[in-house]
């Protein structure tokens, strides 16, 4: 009889990876080597996506702030410079949400900066 080394553990490991690749197409969802390659690629893309998400949201907040400030007669760069000069510690995320949800409050902030 042939000695099987690590048989059950290997089977479980393969099963676990194949289960994660359930929705992949063709061989990428049932052939272990292809599944493994596909999952590694997926994890790489997920890692990159998590980094890009931060950039994308920061761009969005800046765009929103810039549009709100243009309507109030000032520029984004000047506004942010005056914010730091007046030592007001509000980040772009908070400011963009305030500009959208509470325009009166945002008007007061802009008036204080001017």
Image (cartoon, rainbow, N blue to C red):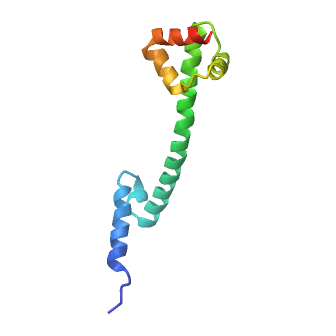
Q: Is residue 34 above or below residue 44?
A: below
Residue drawn at 37 percent across, 74 percent down: 10
Quick one: 51 or 18, which is closer to the camera? 51
Residue drawn at 55 percent across, 33 percent down: 56
Looking at the rendering, which quadrant does residue 5 occupy? bottom left
Q: Position of residue 34 (x, y in %)?
A: 46, 62
Which quarter of the rendering shows the C terminus?
A: top right
Quick one: 15 or 73, which is closer to the camera? 73
Q: Position of residue 74 (x, y in %)?
A: 64, 10
Image position of 9 (left or right of 108): left
Q: Is residue 104 above or below residue 24?
A: above
Q: Position of residue 111 (x, y in %)?
A: 57, 8
Which quarter of the rendering shows the N terminus?
A: bottom left
Looking at the rendering, which quadrant does residue 51 occupy? top right
Image position of 112 (left or right of 37): right
Residue drawn at 58 percent across, 24 percent down: 62
Residue drawn at 36 percent across, 89 percent down: 3
Q: Residue furthest front?
A: 87
Image position of 56 (left or right of 8): right
Q: Position of residue 38 (x, y in %)?
A: 47, 57
Q: Is residue 44 above or below residue 101?
A: below
Q: Is residue 22 above or below residue 107?
A: below
How many discs mark residues in the rendered view? 0
């Amino acid at each position: 009889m042939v000695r099987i080394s690590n048989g059950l553990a290997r089977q479980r490991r393969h099963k676990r990876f194949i289960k994660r690749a359930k929705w992949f197409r063709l061989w990428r969802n049932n052939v272990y080597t292809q599944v493994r390659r596909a999952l590694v690629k997926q994890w790489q893309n997920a890692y990159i996506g998590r980094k890009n998400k931060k950039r994308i949201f920061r761009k969005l907040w800046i765009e929103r702030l810039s549009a709100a400030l243009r309507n109030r007669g000032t520029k984004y760069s000047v506004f942010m410079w005056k914010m730091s000069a007046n030592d007001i510690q509000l980040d772009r995320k908070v400011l963009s949400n305030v500009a959208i949800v509470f325009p009166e409050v945002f008007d007061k902030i802009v008036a204080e900066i001017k």
